[in-house]
Image: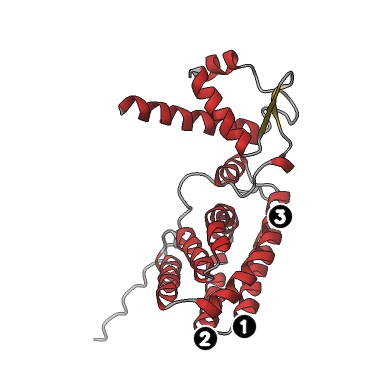
Amino acid sequence: MQFSTTIKNMHGHTLDGLGLDIVSGRYSAIGALPPEPVLCQQLGVSRTVIRESVKSLVAKGLLSTGPKVGTRVMPDAHWNWFDPDVVNWQARCGLTPEFLKDLQELRRVVEPAAVRLAAERATPEDIANIEAAYAGMKQAVEEGGDYVTHDLRFHAGLLQASHNRMLVQMSKALNALLRTSFEISTRIQDGTKNSLPLHRAVLNAVIARNPAKAERAVMVLIEGARNDIDQVLTSRRKLPVVSGAATPIKLKTKLAKRPAKTPV
């Protein structure tokens, strides 16, 4: 059992390392991956681990294999951008304007339709879950803490409330994509504070069973996120690298007011 766990961990570590190397551009597109013996030596793993990792990367669209051509790196147009690992590797290597543009376009296509369905189909349990996520966002804004995780739960809750199996299955991939956008909002002054009432408007419309209003509200929310991203892009600030735990909100320390003097 211990041996099996070790092999699994080595496979995960090797897959992660090779994926990052490909996405970062260390191995250029249409270029050949180094031969197995070289990779084994570089990474300190067996051929079996390398082969399993390559199979996983082929499934994710990052590599292709074939007789006489070996193992080659594929252009990013072939990558599975709905695979959370691929999104994670891109986020860790650094976001790009093209990636963020594609994300915003995807949101404008998927989320309004999902929210319309949520307004029609949400159960009391769905509403309670989304309410809890919103409460977590509100607490993070007011007291500091992990806003992004609750924001992701809010949007995942809306997809779940659509009760469309395909949309629900997209939730995991969309969460990985959306986190990159939400991380940018937390880096903009008052970004999360300004976004909070927009989330409330979406939730209120879902509770009111008003699909048209819910769709309009989520479009306003998406436009707000787009403005945040445009603000970062036009400022020419370096786009954030998203890795590890979500960035918590830190409240500004306020100077304590001096107590008023007691009249004599």
Give the residue number, with chain letter if any, for mark 3.
102
Decide which of 70, 174 is in the foreground and name it: 70
Give the residue number, with chain letter if any, for mark 2.
208
Give the residue number, with chain letter if any, for mark 1.
213
Tag 3: amino acid = Asp
Residue 130 percent location from the top left of the image = 45, 71
Secondary structure state at the residue bearing disc 2? loop
Q: Is residue 116 left or right of residue 109?
A: left
Determine the image quadrant of residue 189.
bottom right
- The residue depicted at 61 percent of the width and 30 percent of the height is 21
Secondary structure state at the residue bearing disc 1? helix
Q: Quadrant of the C terminus?
A: bottom left
Which numbered circle lies on residue 147?
none
Secondary structure state at the residue bearing disc 3? helix
Q: Residues within 10 Å of mark 1 (few under 14, many from 20)?
A: some
Decide which of 244, 258 is in the foreground and name it: 244
Residue 54 percent location from the top left of the image = 58, 28
Tag 2: amino acid = Ala
Asked whether disc 1 touches disc 2, contact meaning CB atoms under 8 Å apart, the reply is yes
Nearer the viewer's eye, disc 2 or disc 3? 2
